[in-house]
Each structure stands twice: as structure tokens, then as C-alpha cells.
Image: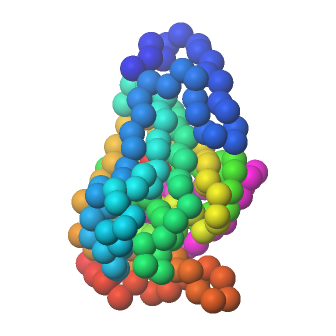
């Protein structure tokens, strides 16, 4: 973790999302996404990389802002596009901002009450994720999807709710283009 009391700079490779220096990098493969897609991945896909997150880590306090870049690979599992796990913030009221840098994606958001919203992620898009809205990004294109995220320092991540209940809608590859479909496995509280 950085001594966030002192000012600092990092440099981002805008088209690759690489931060230099990075404090922490996590990689999610198909095996980490078990049960999140309607279909299980083809064995031929092996344990493909789905996304990488580079993080700048500052103290987990509302006085600070966590920053990260996400690089989502292009691909599908069945008819569903590669996506992030998705999460609520552990502290539900904490908000977040996404800035699209490369590629074409969708940001799927949902409340615990079952409302949902889908916004575009494209280079230059700024998406505001209000507190209380779960969020998952989806790569609907054929190249990398890269975006920058900034969120309140003590937000934390609740992955379990999405793992258990899913999100109300899915992004699928239909003959006429990407389609937002109702998730048949979504269970509302
Ligand atoms: C963090 C922010 C992003 C995601 C990243 C990966 O609050 O929303 O940095 O962590 O896009 O998604 P996930 O759902 O695996 O954390
Ligand atoms: Zn978040």
C-alpha cells in the first residue's frame, strides 16, 4: 500500500490499461467464474484468462480513493460474452466512476430490489455507479475492453450476493448483435 499522505503519480498505458508502477495485479480465469455463466465453458477453452485488474492500493478509508484498471479479454461462454464477476460494494452506499479507454463493452448495474440499468463502455465514456448498485462489465467486442475505475476507499467488495443470486439481465451474442436478456437463474430477494 502507498503512503497516500504523500502525493504520487503513476503512468497508464491507455490502450493496454497497464499502470506503472502497479501495487497489485489480479487475474481471473474461467475456473474463477464457475457457475456464473448459464453454460459451463467448453473444455477446449481450457482455463482461459478472462480479465486482469491492476490496482493502486491506498488506505481503506473514506478519505481516500482506490483506483484500478480492468482489461477484459474478448470471448464468450455459450452465448454470453466474457464478463467480470460483478459485485456490490460491501459498504452499500459507496459510489464509483468508470472511464472507458478501449474497446466496446456494457456496464450492467442492479439494485438489491431488482432494478437494473445497462450503460455503454467505449473510449471516453464516463459511467457513474451510484451506491447500492451492483456492477459487472461485459466485453461485447472482438478486441480488449479496457477501463479505469475510481471508488471510495473503504467501499470493499461483496461478491457472494451476485454469486448466489446472479444479476437480473445477461448480455448475449444474438444474430442481430449484443442482446440484453432476462437472466432465467436470477433470484430476487
Ligand atoms: C472495483 C471496480 C473494478 C472491478 C474490476 C473487476 O470496485 O468495480 O475495479 O473490481 O473491474 O471486477 P470484479 O467484479 O471482479 O471486482
Ligand atoms: Zn466496484
Is residue 105 in view?
A: yes
- Which of the 4 quarters of the picture holds residue 127? bottom right
What percent of the width, then of the height, locates residue 74?
56, 61
What percent of the width, then of the height, locates residue 87?
37, 57
Q: Residue at x 47, y 63 (%)?
A: 83
Q: Residue at x 61, y 53 (%)?
A: 144
Depth check: give the residue in front, 154 or 53: 53
What percent of the width, then of the height, locates residue 126?
69, 53
Depth check: give the residue in front, 105 or 41: 41
- Which of the 4 quarters of the picture holds residue 34? bottom left
Depth check: give the residue in front, 65 or 13: 13
Q: Residue at x 29, y 58 (%)?
A: 31
What percent of the width, then of the height, locates residue 35?
27, 70
Q: Residue at x 37, y 50 (%)?
A: 28
Q: Can residue 130 be found in the magenta stretch?
A: yes
Q: Which residues are magenta?
A: 116-135
Amino acid at each position: 500500500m502507498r503512503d497516500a499522505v504523500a502525493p504520487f503519480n503513476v503512468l497508464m498505458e491507455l490502450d493496454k490499461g497497464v499502470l506503472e508502477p502497479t501495487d497489485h495485479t489480479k487475474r481471473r480465469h474461467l475456473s474463477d467464474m464457475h457457475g456464473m455463466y448459464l453454460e459451463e465453458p467448453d473444455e477446449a477453452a481450457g482455463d482461459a484468462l478472462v480479465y486482469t485488474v491492476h490496482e493502486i492500493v491506498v488506505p481503506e478509508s473514506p478519505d481516500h480513493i482506490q483506483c484500478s484498471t480492468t482489461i477484459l479479454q474478448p470471448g464468450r461462454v455459450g452465448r454470453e460474452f466474457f464478463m467480470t464477476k460483478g459485485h456490490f460494494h460491501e459498504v452499500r452506499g459507496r459510489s464509483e466512476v468508470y472511464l472507458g479507454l478501449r474497446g466496446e463493452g456494457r456496464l450492467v448495474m442492479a439494485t438489491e430490489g431488482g432494478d437494473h440499468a445497462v450503460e455503454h463502455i467505449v473510449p471516453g465514456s464516463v459511467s457513474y455507479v451510484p451506491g447500492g448498485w451492483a456492477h459487472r462489465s461485459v466485453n461485447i467486442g472482438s478486441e480488449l475492453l479496457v477501463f479505469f475505475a475510481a471508488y471510495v476507499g473503504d467501499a470493499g467488495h461483496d461478491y457472494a450476493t451476485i454469486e448466489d443470486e446472479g444479476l437480473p439481465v445477461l448480455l448475449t451474442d444474438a444474430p442481430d448483435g449484443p442482446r440484453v436478456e432476462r437472466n432465467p437463474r436470477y433470484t430476487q430477494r
